[in-house]
Image (cartoon, rainbow, N blue to C red):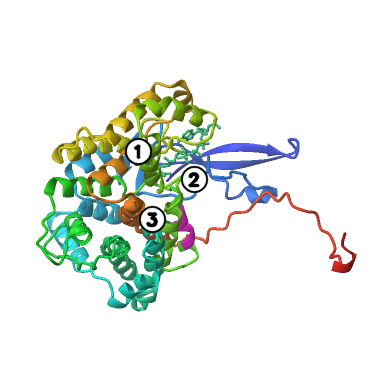
Amino acid sequence: MDEKNRTVNLSYNEGQNTIDLPVLEGTLGPDVVDIRNLAKTGMFTFDPGYLATASCESKITFIDGDLGLLYYRGYPIEELAEDADYLETCYLLIYGELPTREQKDEFVRIVTHHTMIHEQLAAFFKGFRRDSHPMAMMVGVTGAMSAFYQDSMDYSSKANDRMVAAYRLISKLPTIAAMCYRYTNGLPFMYPRNDLSYSANFMHMMFSTPCETYEPNPVLVKALDRILILHADHEQNASTSTVRLAGSSGANPFACVAAGIACLWGPAHGGANEAVLKMLDEIGDVAHVPAFMDGVKNKTHKLMGFGHRVYKNMDPRASIMRRTCYEVLGELGLQDDPKFKLAMALEKIALEDPYFIERKLYPNVDFYSGIVLSALGIPVSMFTAIFAMARTVGWISHWNEMISDPNQKIGRPRQLYTGAQRRDYVPIDVRK
Ligand code: SDX
């Protein structure tokens, strides 16, 4: 962060007082006004939904919403999605640099050998109804991990404990996610296979059976791996901010990631991919699109998978996801998949409609991801669980960045109070 002694001057009390607030400049992106001294004026800033608030300094991910740019540690998402794999991307997000061959091999070895979960943790599933939503189980079982790893809980002072927790979460979330799917379908849990890559192993734990040999399709594995890369991190989104806020109190990383999963579940956030498929099912046919769009414009419903707080241009992940759609559907001979055709028709109509153009509403990462995940054989109810599995590395990277900062403080926003003035208690027998 570069402080060139630039300031903004704020005058208040009808100009009787002024305060100079420092302007801080990052490597990329907008400058920020440092308002930490504003409380001296007796006033707070007011920014519900954090439309214009930078909550922290970070070196992990950069987004330019106007240009549609997304960089992980400076590397464009398009290049990582094309040339890297998910575990290499995990290493980059956590450590800040692309791994050497030796570093990557060691990282893969450690992650691979942490994929099993404690047998008693598996017992938690028996407490869930069979029709439980996978995200309900993900929240519960991930949070329960904090009951199993008491050995390394000194996270504030021991970087090693933080890395152990990071490995455990990155390694075990796919196992837990696959177990959610298996449990709701009455299938036996499949143990991880160390001979498979991270994404191939997830496909194995999801779809193989004890009765026959299962070898995942490499084209589908590559597509899933790319989907995980696209979802790995995204700056200070709602669920990452949730993890940071939970972590700022000193809560353990398993509880923090469980809080992130809970936040991601919302349809305005990670739950949108599931909502997109339900929306496409509801529309049914391109002939129904005009009526559906009327409903969007009179605010009856939203066009799920469209719009973004930051991107006022195409979400770069959506373009990559659309291309992945073509590849996967082509591999499976489903290029005429009606849902994909309907989604592309919907996108074309929306991008030409003044309502969406005026509001800078473009497809986001969730618009096409559900179609790809469906083609991979993953049920709609599991979409957000896959998103959570992928985003775990982003959450834990931000948690680690925050905990490593010796100056970090507990997050404690203030408010604009508009409630009752002070008043005295009234005994119940004389109340009207
Ligand atoms: C993710 O933050 C992240 O980085 C998140 C994420 C990540 O990787 O972590 O990128 C993942 O969450 C992607 C977003 C997935 N959500 C959806 O697809 C749900 C549909 N989208 C909307 O709910 C909405 O666009 C949000 C929540 C994503 C963003 O909302 P904002 O920034 O608060 O914008 P807004 O609600 O103030 O909308 C501005 C205008 C409004 O119209 P007017 O009041 O000006 O007339 O745009 C309209 C909104 O009604 N609008 C939409 C719309 N999204 C916004 N209208 C129709 N359909 C939509 N999808």
**Which amino acid lies under the numbered mark 1 shown in the image of this protein?**
Phe
Which label belongs to residue 398? 3
**Which amino acid lies under the numbered mark 3 shown in the image of this protein?**
His
Q: Using a 10 Å C-alpha cutoff, classify the residue at mark 2 as few (fewer than 14 neighbours), some (14 to 19) or many (20 or more).
A: some
Mark 2–mark 1 distance (CA, rounded to whole Å): 27 Å
Kindly check if marks 2 and 1 are in contact, taking CB atoms under 8 A apart as contact.
Answer: no
Task: Name the quadrant of the C terminus.
Answer: bottom right
Q: Is residue 244 magenta?
A: yes
Q: Is residue 426 above or below residue 331?
A: below
Residue 141: image location, x then y, percent: 37, 68
Which label belongs to residue 367? 1
Mark 3–mark 2 distance (CA, rounded to whole Å): 14 Å
**Which amino acid lies under the numbered mark 2 shown in the image of this protein?**
Ala
Q: Give the secondary structure at mark 1.
A: helix
The answer to whether 41 appears left or right of 431 in the picture is left
- Towards the viewer: 68 or 214: 214
Query: How many discs mark residues in the rendered view?
Result: 3
The magenta region covers: 241-246
The residue lying at 40 percent from left, 50 percent from top is 58
- Looking at marks 2 and 1 on the same chain, the residue that comes earlier in the sequence is marked by 2
